[in-house]
Amino acid sequence: MLLNSEIKFRKCFPIALIMIVLQIMPSYAQEEPLAIMGVLDLRNYQFSEDSEITLAGDWKFYKDTFLFGSHAPSSITSYIKVPYIWDEKTHPEGTFSRHGYATYSLQVFLPKRRPEVAIIQIGSIVFAYNLYLNGTKIASCGQPGKSQNEEIPHLEVKMVPVSLYSDTLFFTIHMSNFHHRIGGVNKPISIMVSDKYIRQRNIVSLIGFITFGILITIGVLHIILWLQIRKEMVSLYFGAAAIFIALRILFTGDFLINNITDISGIYQKKIEFLLMYSIPYPLLMYVSILFPKYTYKNFINIIFIITGTFFLITLFTTSSVFTLLSGVSRTLVVIIGLYLAFSMARAALAKEPFALLFFISFLLFNVAVLYDIINSLYGFVPIHMTPFGLLGFIFTQSSVLITNYLKAFRKNEELSMQLQETNMILEDKVSIRTAELEDAMAQLAEKNEEIMAQNEIVDKHQREVALRNAEMKSSMKYAARIQAAFQTENAQIKKLFPESFVFFAPRDVLSGDFYWSAPVGDKTLVAVADCTGHGVPGAMMSMLGMAFLNEVLSLGVYKPNIILDALREKVKMSLRQTEQNSTQKDGMDIALCLIDTHNKCIEYSGAFISAYLVYESEIKILAADKNPIAVYYSESPFSVQKYNYRPGEMLYLSSDGFADQFGGEEVKKFKPHRFKTMMLDAHQMQTNLQQDFIKETFYKWKANYSEQIDDVTVLGIRLK
C-alpha cells in the first residue's frame, strides 16, 4: 500500500510543481515604458488602482560629483541603465570603478489623468544614497560620501508616499559605494498607486516577525530539551539550525532588523553571510543522526571545512572581499539541498520510520525556496515562502519527537510494572536474609564482648605508652632549650645585619641543623651547618659543632678555610676518627662566610654547602669543596673564595633539607633549580617578607607529602 502511494506521489509531484510555477509567473496587462536618455514619458500610460511602474531604463549619469537637476551641465557625459551595477562598461571610457560616488537624474512626464498620491518604493541600494524629488529629499539610506570615511553604509527597503501635483517629476539620486564589491543603483525604484503596498509590506514584516518568533521559540525549546537529555544531539543540531535561520530572516528580504535597531550596512551584510554559513553543518548533522545509514560523514566534514573557511573569510575581511563568495555559496546551497533530498529519499525507499514524512516536508520546503528564488528574479509578490516551508519542516520534526517521547513513555510504564514485580521478589528475599542477619548479629554481639575486654587491656597499654611519650617529649623540649642556648639568637644576627632573616624548621623537636654568627673586629663570621642525622643524634653533633667553632675562634683564627680545617680536626679527634677508612664517619656539612662591610667583600669556605648571591635577577654561586667536616677518603685543605659584593645584594646560606623535601603534585624533590628560582623571585622583597615567602613555599610544596624528611635552615642577609 505504501509503495503505491509513493508511485502516485512521484507522478503527481512534478505536475503540481509545474502548476505552482505557472501560477507564480508574472503576467503583464500593459507593457511598461522605459526611460530613454534620462526621460521617462508616461503621458500615454493609463494608471489603475494596482499600477506599479518601475523607473527603469537609461538615466542621466554624472560620475564623481553630487549635483541637482537645475545645476546639471547641459552636455551629458553618459547614461546608465537602472537597475544596473557599475563596471567598466558603464562608461565609454571604460575606466569607472565599482567604488565611487555619482549623481543619477531622471525626468518623468505624467499623464493628465493620474492619482493625487503615489508611493515611491526604493530597493536596498548598495550602499548609501539620498533620493530627491523636484529638489526635495524624500528618502535616504545611510549617508553617501565622497570617500570611505565620509560614507555611512546602510541597507533598507524604503516606501515613501509622495504627492503627484505636478505633471513633471525630477528624480535625483546621490549615491556612493566604497565598501561593497557591487556599486550603483542595483535595485529597482518603483511608483505605486495604491497604499495597499504599504499595508502589504507591513503584513509581510509582521509575518516575518511572527515566523522569527516561532523559529526562535522552537529552536530554544530544542536546545533546552538537549540540556535536559544530553544524549539527544538531534535536538541540539535542529535547535541551532532553527535559531540561525530565524536570525537570518532579520537580515534578508525586507531587513526586519531595521525595525529593531539602526545597524550599519557593513554589519548587516556581514551578519547575513555569517548566518548563511552557520546553517548547513547543524542541518546536515541533524539528518545524519536521524538516518545514519544513508548519509556520508566525509561529505559533512567537507561541507564543514568549506563553510568554516567561508565563515572565517567573512569574519575577517571586508564586504568587497567576502561577497565574492556569493555565487559559490549559492551553488553550495544547491548541492547541500540535493544531498539532503537524496539522503531522505534513500531512507524513505528503505522504509525507515518517518523518512517518507520528512522527505515530503523537505520537498515542500524546497518548493518554497524555489518560489522565493523566482520571486526574487521578478519581484512580483513581496512574500517569502521559505519561512513557512521551514515551519512545516520544523513542525514535522517536532511531531516525530513527540511520537518518540510517547513511545519512550509507554516503554517506561512497562519497565515500571516489571520493576514492581522485581521489587516484590526482592522483598521476599530481603525478609529471609534479614532473619539470617539477625542470627549473625547475635553471634557478633558475643564476639564484641570479647573484643571489648581485649580493648580494655589495649587501652591500659596505650595509656602507659602515652605517659612514656609525654615524659620523652618533655625531655626533648628541655634538650631543645639547651640546644637553643648554644645557638646564635636571631636577635644577635638582626643586630649585626638589620636586614636579615632565618627560616629554621627542625624535622623533630631537636635539630641536626644550626646557624651561627660571631663578630670579629669590624667583620662578621656567619655559618649554616647540617650535621649527620637529625633529632637527638643530630642535636648532639650540632652542639659539638657550635662549641668547636667558638673554641677555634677563641684561638684567634678568623680565616674561614683555616677555621674549617681546625674544625675538621677537632671533630675527628673527638669522635676518634683516626683512619680514612674508619667506619665512624659522623660529622657535618657547613658554609662559613667572613663579611667585611667596610670593604664590601666576602671570604667564603664551604664543606658541601654552597653560598648564593643574588642581585637584580642575577645569581652568583660560590661552590663548596667536596670535603665534609669528618674523616674522608681524599681529604684536602679547604679553599677560600673572595667576592666583592654590591650594596643591596642578597646572601643566602641553606642546608640541603629544603631542596631534598618531597612534595608538589607529582611528589618529587624540590631540587636546587627550584630553590634558585625561589631566591630569584624573593630577593627584591623586604627580608621579613622573604622569610614569609620562603616559609609559605616550603609548606605548600610538602602539603601533598605531609612528612618532613630532614631539618631545614635558610639564612638570608642583605649586604650593605
Image: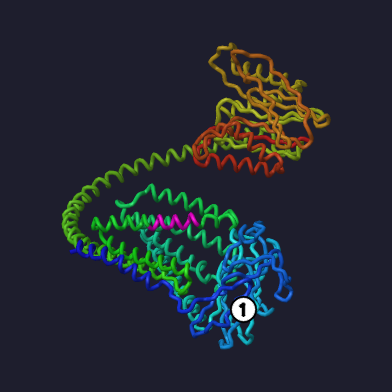
Disc 1 crowd, CA 10 A, few/some/many (<14, 14-19, 20+): some
Q: Residue at x 73, y 21 (%)?
A: 640
Left or right relative to 684: residue 40: left
Can you give x and y, in whole percent of width and height, for residue 260 in the image? Answer: 55, 73
Compared with residue 256, is residue 225 higher up or lower down, i.e. above or below?
above
Which range is magenta? 327-337
Task: Look at the image and say whether residue 458 sits in the magenta stretch.
Answer: no
Q: Secondary structure at mark 1?
A: strand
Residue 264 in view in this figure: no
**Residue at the disc numbered 1:** 108
Q: Position of residue 633 (x, y in %)?
A: 59, 13
Image quarter in which the N terminus is found: bottom left
Closest to the observer, 628 or 553: 628
Residue at the image point whose x is 54% and y is 70% from the top: 257
Q: Amino acid at mark 1?
A: Val
Q: Mostly what secondary structure, the magenta segment?
A: helix
Report the front residue among 548 and 61: 61
Q: Is residue 234 visible?
A: yes
Q: Quadrant of the C terminus?
A: top right
Residue 331 belongs to magenta span: yes
x, y (%) of residue 714?
64, 35
- Left or right: where does residue 475 sit relative to residue 228? right
Q: Nearer the viewer, residue 312 or 331?
A: 331
Closer to the camera in the image, 657 or 393? 393
Name which quarter of the figure residue 551 lies in.
top right
